[in-house]
Image: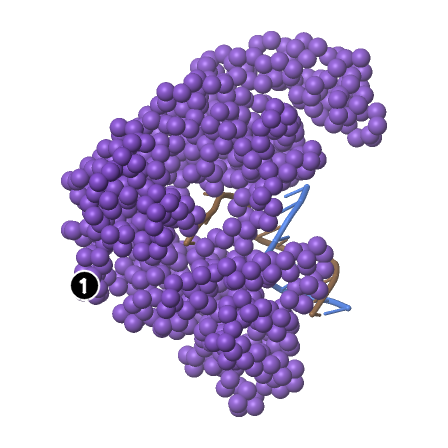
Chain colours: A purple, B brown, C blue
Amino acid sequence: MDVSPIIDPLNEAQREAVTAQNAHLLVLAGAGSGKTRVLVHRMAWLMQVDQVPATGLLAVTFTNKAAREMRNRISEMMNLSGYGLWFGTFHSIAHRLLRAHWQDAGLPENFQVLDSDDQLRLIKRVMRDLQIDETRWPPKQVQWFINGQKDEGLRADHIQDNPGDHFVSVMLKIYRQYEKQCQLSGLVDFGELLLRSHELWLKKPALLGHYQRRFQHILVDEFQDTNTIQYAWLQVLAGQRVPMTIVGDDDQSIYGWRGARIENIQKFQQDFPDARLVRLEQNYRSTQTILKAANAVIANNQGRLGKELWTDGPDGELINLYAAFNEQDEANYIADTISAWVDDGNLRSEAAILYRSNAQSRVLEEALLRQGIPYRVYGGLRFYDRQEIRNALGYLRLVHYRHDDAAFERVVNTPPRGIGAKSLGELRELATGQGISLWQAAERLLEAGAMKGRAKTGLQQFIGLIESLAADQDELDLKQLTQRAIEGSGLRDHHANEKGEKAQARVENLEELVSAMADFEVEDGIDPLSEFIAQAALDAGESQADEHQDSVQLMTLHSAKGLEFPLVFLAGVEEGLFPHSMSLEEPGRMEEERRLAYVGITRAMKRLVMTYAESRRLYGQEKFHALSRFVREVPGDCIQEVRLRNTVTRPALTQRPNEGLFDSTPMADAGLQLGQRVHHPKFGEGVVMNCEGSGHHTRVQVNFDDGAKWLVLAYAPLEKL
DNA sequence: ATCGTTGATGGTAAC
DNA sequence: CATCAACGAT
């Protein structure tokens, strides 16, 4: 048997990980160390050498994107379709289990996945029923509480109700009612998927045994992001017999705020003491300089498992640090630098602008727009979270499952058919009173002749529409069914008639949904409609239309994890922004911010530029932030500060963090005087209105001849006249 | 049903 | 400051 394709492309540590014989394996994989490659090759190894069939492997990832990528790579390598493999996120695997064993799990056959938007609506409804003041107990906070508890594996009944703690009492009351309502309507939220399947195994040992025999090896990616219930789930499944390969990097754990337990890595070592440990420290992505910076920054964290990235590649360029006058200037500098990068023959898509918070993207976008640089913003609204899409799916969900109250509420009056708040209130009242679904309540009220006028005809029409779609379901494929739902309900016209530019975009999105339906394939024996609906809840869905154009990538540091770019900008490296002001107090949170900095720095392959604004408009106020501590933690010889018209190597900054960076006078550096006439290649001629140095850099304010307004330029290439 | 006003909020974000 | 959801008025 020839295993050379599997092990030849690997370095020593990677090979050790791929071929490890021990029962359990823990791979500490640094950024850019070939983590995905190791996982893929290990799967190949297990199949080819250990003769594990494809159906005997379970691979768990955190995003669908990662799962898809891995599936593609393994099926390419092994030349198989990839269908037999169990690949997916914790949630999608749990979902699959619950679908298969709904009876054992105590769920209705048609249970639906509740996404966070629907979840919030349901919580609001429950609170209204319980007559709990929404202003005093914000529904968002309730949602946070419930999800947090579920992340910890706790149901309402598991939590001690302490009458002294009013907050917990109220939360529990809502939680309990919410659980009841979910069960009644056959709704399962994200946390519930995990909780329920965990309980399923504890409750049905025979079933657990079946899967333990089936899975001969479990592989888990991004293990540092697992939360308590996910870990418990894995632990039960693996039991005493199924070996696991766990891959993670404690230094890249950045989701503590959503329940991730970094200490699960140590816990794994304790719970499975025979686990072999392999460290992947050779980096194939970044230059020496960038890695030196990253290592130095992360070294400031306590209690790390310990790992130091290295490369045998070149030193590369120094990291550039640009001190902007304000956030506009920062954005302009970045846009200019990208223009120059493109002029040098590089692709825009090789450049990424990373920032701590989404709000920062706007100014950056404006600058790029002004310079005509195409860009793409990641994150933001998911495709399946868009109103029009949710509406369309609402109809389909009702066709699939009449008692889906969340869907009913959403579309019963969208587009408007005269069923206003009053009629809906009556429906809700009857439904909660009788413990039936809104759909059943509607049928009963109609039969009893309790509705009249527009509400009556509207409701009849609505019910008729759903029934007729359901009746024709078997003759139509998914695409045709969706088309009919969108047209027949008047949803398409409804959105087309909206005012503004959004109307067209919404109709286009609806069309995109229809074509997504056409491409949707499922394995035999699975109901495609049900599968699609679940997928819509469980999958972010790649959305942006213009992704084929060569464009600059904008995203938060969080969404940059796992990606790499030749040119990376870290914008807004300022105390209070990054690290974020909410994290300044607690050391634990500060360490998470630092890991985020580590993630950001290690995204860069060739060139890294960090920028900060001396003055930034934030919540309507001018803020003057100090340079981020994370920049100050970078060794001085890795950084150069970009200045007006020339660059200066920065002196050892770490030794005197609060002083100015330079001793020379910026005024003289700029070679300008007040009132002097200057020329700017883009804006033409003008007169210098102000020119001052803060000790960090020079600010030049120029009043240009052709515009009434005057611009503030801190770095603009000015020529004296 | 649509428009305009008020008020809260401003952190990261996957499933 | 600026945005957006929620609410009230026409």
Query: From the viewer's perspective, is residue A513 above or below residue A374?
Result: below
Residue A646 visible in image: yes
Give the residue furthest to the front: A1
**Which residue corresponds to the image point at 39% horizontal and 28% vertical from the top-left?**
A284
Q: Is residue A119 left or right of residue C1?
A: left
Relative vertical location of residue A261 with respect to residue A476 in this rendering, above or below = above
Question: Is residue A326 at all visible to an observer of this figure?
Answer: no
* Whole-percent x, y for residue A626 in the image: 53, 26
Residue annotated with mark 1: A205
Q: Measured along the vertical axis of the image, is residue A171 above or below residue A356?
A: below
**What residue is rendered at 56% in x and 38% in y?**
A554
Q: Which sits in the foreground, A276 or A524?
A: A524
Residue type at mark 1? Pro
A185 w.r.t. A270: above or below: below
Q: Position of residue A276 (x, y in %)?
A: 19, 37
Q: Which is nearer the eye, A138 or A554?
A: A554
Quadrant in the picture for residue A212: bottom left
Give the secondary structure at mark 1.
Answer: helix
Q: Quadrant of the N terminus of chain A?
A: top left
* Residue A5 x, y percent position in the rendering: 30, 36
